[in-house]
Each structure stands twice: as C-alpha cells, then as structure tokens.
C-alpha cells in the first residue's frame, strides 16, 4: 500500500516525527477505523511506533492502493484505553 503526505499535514506535525507516522502505518498490529469530519470520509489508524508510542494517523483513500496521510497525533486517554483493550483481545 502506497502512502503519500498531504503537504500541509507534514508541515503541521508537532512533537511527532514523520518516521513515527511511517512506523505506525507499517506496524504489524494496527487498528483501522472509519471516520468522518465535516463530510470528509477517511480512516484513522491506531498503532504503536517502534518505541511503543501510541499514535493515531489519519489517511484518505485516493483510489487503488494509494492513500494520503492527512494528519497524526497522540492518542487521547480514552483512545489509549480502547486500543490497549483491542491489543489484549487481538493477542
């Protein structure tokens, strides 16, 4: 699956390195969820970086096997609880 950055999303990263985003997207275990904001449909992909940092990455489907990275952030406490529960159930 090919990922490309939305230029504005890369510029807006704060306290997250682009390689951490790539690590989440290529992680063996990640949790994709459909999302919508302001009428725009996208996926959030929850996962861990190589060092175990839990992040949420938002991607937009472009067609075929291409996706555009539109944002990334740390998980909220509620998201982290849900993700840890999913990790435990998935193992």
Image (spheres, helix red, strand yellow):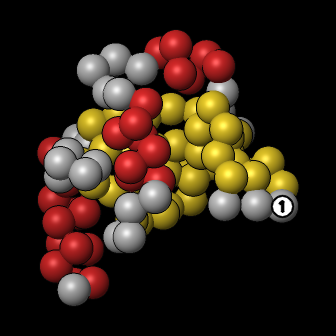
Relative image position of residue 14 (x, y in whole percent): 34, 17
Comparing 5 with 36, the one in front is: 5
**Considering the image in quadrants, where does the C terminus appear?**
bottom left
Q: In this image, 43 relative to 18: left or right? A: right
Residue drawn at (16%, 79%), measured in percent from left and top?
88
Residue drawn at (52%, 43%), measured in percent from left and top?
58
Q: Is residue 51 above or below residue 9?
A: below
Comparing 39 with 44, the one in front is: 44
Does residue 78 show up?
Answer: no
Secondary structure category for the residue under label 1? loop
State the image quarter where residue 16 is shown: top left
Q: In this image, 64 relative to 87: left or right? A: right
Residue drawn at (25%, 51%), measured in percent from left and top?
50
**Considering the image in quadrants, where does the N terminus appear?**
bottom right
Does residue 42 show up?
Answer: yes
Residue drawn at (33%, 56%), measured in percent from left and top?
47
Q: Which residue is mark 1?
A: 64
Residue reaching furthest to the right: 63
Q: Is residue 91 above or below residue 62?
A: below
């Amino acid at each position: 699956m090919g990922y490309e950055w939305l230029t504005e999303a890369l510029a807006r990263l704060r306290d997250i390195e682009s390689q951490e985003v790539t690590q989440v997207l290529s992680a063996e275990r990640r949790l994709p969820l459909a999302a919508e904001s302001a009428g725009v449909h996208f996926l959030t992909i929850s996962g861990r970086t190589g060092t175990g940092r839990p992040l949420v990455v938002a991607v937009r489907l472009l067609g075929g096997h291409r996706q555009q990275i539109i944002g990334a952030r740390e998980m909220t406490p509620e998201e982290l609880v849900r993700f840890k529960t999913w990790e435990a159930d998935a193992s």
